[in-house]
Amino acid sequence: MKGWFVAIDHQHKCLKYIDALVRRGWKETRTFNQAEFILIDADVLGRRRFVENAHGQGKKIFIYPHAARPMLMWDGLHEPYQHITANFVIAEGHAEVLRRYGYPHPLEVAGWTYCYQRPFQSTAGIRVLFGPNHPNANGWLSDVDRSINRRAYKILLGLQRAAKIELTVQYLHELEQNGLWTEPGVQYIRSRPNQSVEHIDAADVVVSTQTLAYLAIARGVPTIMMGESIPPRGGNSEDTFSFVASWEKYCDLMKFPLDILETEDPAGLIQLAAQSDETIREWRRLFIGTMMNPSKFVETVDCYMERTESEHDLHL
């Protein structure tokens, strides 16, 4: 008979994991004292109190993916919590990125959960959906990201004015907080961080980064990213902003092959992306991977739950 667990959900990203556990005998509770383990998306900032509480009560701690992109928060931005049982990642490329920068805890590939995947479909490359880097919850966005947004936006506006594309901008918070502005002939969609693929599926090409771009690739929509050569970064203000510590160790693996800011022929790049996925096929295998196997995920959790602390330490 399996026991109880606590899940700390982030933007509904934990629901597939909860469902897998419940369908295979585990029971969800909101009471920490009752639970045998917790499932959480991060161990830093506001999440640290949950993991400290769990460890203090002798519970095991599993991390599920906080975002579709490999988690880089532990590469010099925050110290990983010492007592993590295992960290579940989306695909093998994610695990390799974390290994390269020295993440200290066990890594397990769980599979893709954000949407149903579809094979690549070539398009005419006319309807372009642009998703800028979005501000944090407090509305702050770094000057680096605002600059990336503006540079990509100006390129796309030039193509739109030349009647080579139809441009839609999907953004979070206020448009101005993204570093952007309204222009005639452009459609603007204020969105929410809910992993919706409605506007992705309606596009011929998506130009974006991070979760929106990863969703588009998973849906088989031609995709171009932006600013991929600039080291990843984090922070909620000028005082807390910083770049990751060891980008050079994994940039060759993680950088997306198509970047709107690294071409002298953006119209040609859009057509290249729209016609074939040959350039990005290996990247998709590494960073989108295959759909989650719920049974395998639960079997992995069960295996860790059966280990004693000494066995866990020996595994490390």
Image (cartoon, helix red, strand yellow):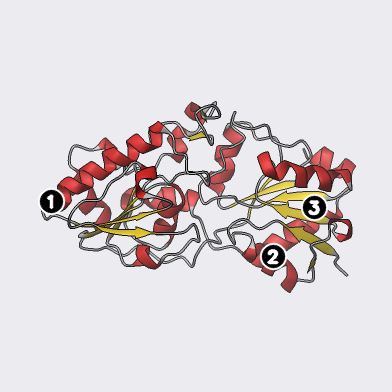
Residue 67's spot in the image, x, y percent? 54, 50
Residue drawn 42% across the image and 48% down it? 283
- Res 123 → quadrant: bottom left
Q: Is residue 54 above or below residue 203?
A: above
Residue 300, labelled with which disc? none
Residue drawn 67% across the image and 39% down it? 45
Report whether 70 appears left or right of 152: right
Mark 1 / mark 3, whichever is N-terminal: 1
Residue 161, labelled with which disc? 1
Residue drawn 49% across the image and 57% down it? 193
Q: Secondary structure at mark 3?
A: helix
Gap in Å between the C-alphas at discs 1 and 2? Answer: 47 Å
Residue 18, labelled with which disc? 2
Using a 10 Å C-alpha cutoff, classify the residue at mark 1 as few (fewer than 14 neighbours), some (14 to 19) or many (20 or more): some
Residue drawn 46% across the image and 40% down it? 254
| Rendered-image quadrant of the C terminus | top right
Q: Are marks 3 and 2 in contact (CB under 8 Å)?
A: no
Which residue type carries mark 2? Answer: Ile
- The number of callouts visible is 3
Q: Is residue 250 above or below residue 107?
A: above
| Rendered-image quadrant of the N terminus | bottom right
- Res 310 → quadrant: top right
Which residue type carries mark 3? Answer: Tyr
Q: Which residue is mark 3?
A: 304
Report whether 285 appears left or right of 80: left
Report whether 306 appears left or right of 66: right
Using a 10 Å C-alpha cutoff, classify the residue at mark 2 as few (fewer than 14 neighbours), some (14 to 19) or many (20 or more): many
